[in-house]
Amino acid sequence: MARRPVEFEDFLPLMADKLGDDGLMEELCNGFRLLMDPRRRLITFDSLKRNAGLLGLDGLRDDELRAMLREGDTDGDGALNQWEFCVLMVRLSPQLMEAPRRWMDQASREAFGPGFMS
């Protein structure tokens, strides 16, 4: 029987199990830094296209890369900030959606203060 290739939605839960909540958030932040435009500190279309090969995405067409940006771009600026990137990565992994609330809450509290989620 042929082995099925590992897909992203399979990989992120494995990372979460291995690294724990804090380690996963750190790795997501590292992934963001790999893809971002260092001047704008955002993932832009150009920075995504330039660095997509680092994540094995070099085979994606321009319209597919733009669709990825649109899917995660909640503030409508045409780019992804670190928060949008992390949320998108979690959304793309259905298995993680079962238990992300505690670390998303923690990240929100760290970003916005302890009273944010009260």
Image: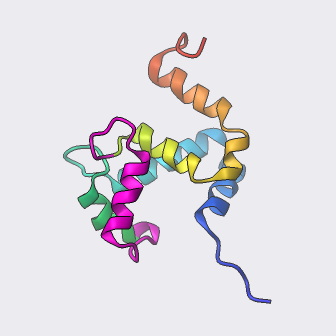
As drawn, is 29 to the left or to the right of 114? left
What residue is rendered at 66% in x and 51% in y? Answer: 94
Residue at the left extreme, as displayed: 39
Looking at the picture, how far across and down is residue 19, in whole percent? 65, 49
Against 102, residue 10 (above or below) is below
Q: What quarter of the picture does the N terminus occupy?
A: bottom right
Query: In the orientation shown, which residue stands out farthest toward the right?
Result: 1
Residue at coordinates 60% horizontally, 39% vertically from top-left? 22
Give the percent coordinates (x, y) of residue 86. Answer: 49, 43
Q: Taking 74 as reference, is 87 left or right? A: right
What number of labels is visible? 0
Give the colour scheme shown: rainbow
Does residue 10 sit above or below 115 in this rendering? below
Q: Is residue 110 magenta?
A: no
The stretch in magenta equals: 54-79
Q: Is residue 71 magenta?
A: yes
Closer to us: 64 or 57: 64
Which residue is drawn at the image coordinates 46% and 72% (left, top)? Answer: 56
Task: Tell me if 102 is positioned left or right of 113 in this view.
Answer: right
The percent coordinates of residue 64 (x first, y second) are 39, 66
> Residue drawn at (73%, 83%), measured in percent from left and top?
3
Residue 112, horizontal then vertical, whole percent:
46, 19
Quadrant of the image containing the C terminus? top right
